Image (tube, rainbow, N blue to C red):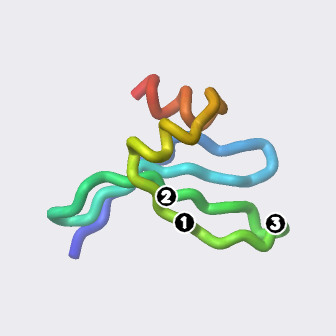
Amino acid sequence: MKTDRRLIYASENGDRWWLRRADGAEAVILHEPNASSGGRTSETAIGAFLRAGAGGPEHRALLDL
């Protein structure tokens, strides 16, 4: 299975958001939290990501694509 991903936004604290698509799958937002936060990597459908956005820089970066 081939997976493509494109970095959308990297925050100053080390969080990263990627636009990710695997073969035959819908594109999703992959969020990789910084190591010190102890958070887990998560995937969110693009529509849900934008609805939950409140205009953060990672949401603006996606819209700029």
Residue at 48% from the left image edge and 37% from the top image edge = 50
Query: Which residue corresponds to mark 2?
Result: 30
Q: Secondary structure at mark 3?
A: helix
Q: Is 20 situated left or right of 38 in this image? A: left
Q: Is residue 62 above or below residue 22?
A: above
Q: CA distance from mark 1 to mark 2?
A: 6 Å
Query: Which residue corresponds to mark 3?
Result: 37
Q: CA distance from mark 2 to mark 3?
A: 16 Å
Q: Is residue 58 above or below residue 55?
A: below
Query: Which residue corresponds to mark 1?
Result: 42
Q: Residues within 10 Å of mark 3 (few under 14, many from 20)?
A: few
Quarter-of-image position of residue 58: top right
**Residue 29 horizontal/vertical position (percent):** 45, 52
Q: Is 53 situated left or right of 6 in this image? A: right
**Residue 22 horizontal/vertical position (percent):** 26, 64
- Say which label, 3 or 1, has the lower sequence index: 3
- Say which label, 1 or 2, has the lower sequence index: 2
The residue positioned farthest toward the left in the image shown: 24
Which residue is nearer to you in this view: 54 or 8? 54
Q: Amino acid at mark 1?
A: Ser
Q: Is residue 51 above or below residue 34?
A: above
Q: CA distance from mark 3 to mark 1?
A: 14 Å
